[in-house]
């Protein structure tokens, strides 16, 4: 669908800016939505014993409910049908079954995007190093502009998140540059086409004090957002990560690591 979106987006937007509220989140009617989410990752560890591949992915549905709250809306999400696998040569477990997920997604949303995340689903142990749901609310509701924009207009956002589990700590920062391309039509529905380009910086720490393994990666995140102005929700969001960095351990020489892969999010109903 990503390639199809690029082809469809050739049509220009209106001559005047979109009206106020056209590009802002609002309370859906009825106050429910279901998104299909898929994440795929592939990479390579250039270890002293040779090149070792990383591969994995997951898919699930996220059932969301909305209600008015101070500062905007409170959104609650329940993961359904979660399935996934991960093969990571850095860990003893290979081809681990990711068919588990703990906790729900809860956050506060205003007209521009996510204000505060109070809870998110989690994997445990080594799985959390590759797949984290700390940014899931932001993927479902990427930042929108705080002013009226017309085609070609841009806005910026910096997404920071941090998780600190029993053995894994993740610190992530992504600086995004969004551009409103204009109108497009997908499956007969009028949508707004937005492109995003971001720079990513991720730090992952595992283990205990004195025996920490550190993964440091930087790179890009580029993608597309299709916005439904009638529903005031994202109809489709896809972005591709391309990261590279190093793995370092106490008393051992660092070695190279790379990860890439797409995240695809689609509004089902």
Image: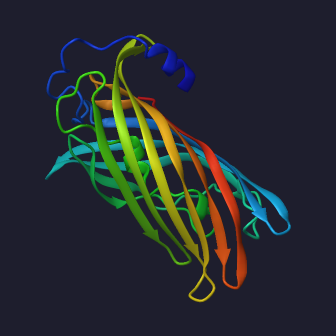
Q: Residue at x 60, y 81 (%)?
A: 212
Q: Residue at x 55, y 62 (%)?
A: 123
Residue 210 place in picture, x, y as percent: 60, 89
Looking at the image, the residue that sits furthest to the right is 49
Is residue 213 toward the left or the right of residue 112 in the image? right
Q: Nearer the viewer, residue 252 or 265?
A: 252
Q: Nearer the viewer, residue 218 or 90?
A: 218
Looking at the image, the residue that sits furthest to the front is 253
Is residue 91 toward the left or the right of residue 110 in the image? right
Q: Quadrant of residue 208?
A: bottom right
Total residue callouts: 0
Residue 40 place in picture, x, y as percent: 63, 44
The N terminus lies in quadrant: top right
Q: Nearer the viewer, residue 198 or 104?
A: 198
Is residue 224 toward the left or the right of residue 29 in the image? right
Report if residue 240 is visible in the image. Answer: yes
Looking at the image, the residue that sits furthest to the bottom is 210
Q: Is residue 30 above or below residue 189?
A: below
Q: Is residue 148 above or below residue 80?
A: above
Residue 164 place in picture, x, y as percent: 46, 73
Q: Residue at x 39, y 42 (%)?
A: 140
Residue 201 place in picture, x, y as percent: 48, 58
Q: Is residue 143 above or below residue 219?
A: above
């Amino acid at each position: 669908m990503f390639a199809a979106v690029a082809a469809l987006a050739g049509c220009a937007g209106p001559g005047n800016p979109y009206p106020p509220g056209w590009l802002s989140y609002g309370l859906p009617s009825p106050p429910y939505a279901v998104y299909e989410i898929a994440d795929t990752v592939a990479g390579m560890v250039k270890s002293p014993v040779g090149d070792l591949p990383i591969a994995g992915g997951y898919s699930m549905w996220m059932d969301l409910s909305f209600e008015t709250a101070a500062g905007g809306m409170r959104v609650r999400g329940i993961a359904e049908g979660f399935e996934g696998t991960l093969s990571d040569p850095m860990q003893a477990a290979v081809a681990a079954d990711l068919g588990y997920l703990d906790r729900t997604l809860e956050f506060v949303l205003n007209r521009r995007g996510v204000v505060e995340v109070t809870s998110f689903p989690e994997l445990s142990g080594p799985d959390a190093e590759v797949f984290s749901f700390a940014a899931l609310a932001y993927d479902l509701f990427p930042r929108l502009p705080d002013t009226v924009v017309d085609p070609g207009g841009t806005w910026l956002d910096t997404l920071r998140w941090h998780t600190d589990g029993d053995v894994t700590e993740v610190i992530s920062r992504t600086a995004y540059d969004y551009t409103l391309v204009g109108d497009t039509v997908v499956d007969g529905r009028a949508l707004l086409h937005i492109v995003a380009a971001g720079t990513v910086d991720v730090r992952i720490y595992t283990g205990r004090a004195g025996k920490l393994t550190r993964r440091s990666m930087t790179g890009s995140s580029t993608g597309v957002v299709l916005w439904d102005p009638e529903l005031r929700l994202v109809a489709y969001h896809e972005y591709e990560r391309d990261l590279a960095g190093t793995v370092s351990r106490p008393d051992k020489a660092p070695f190279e690591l790379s990860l890439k892969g797409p995240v695809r999010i689609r509004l089902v109903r």
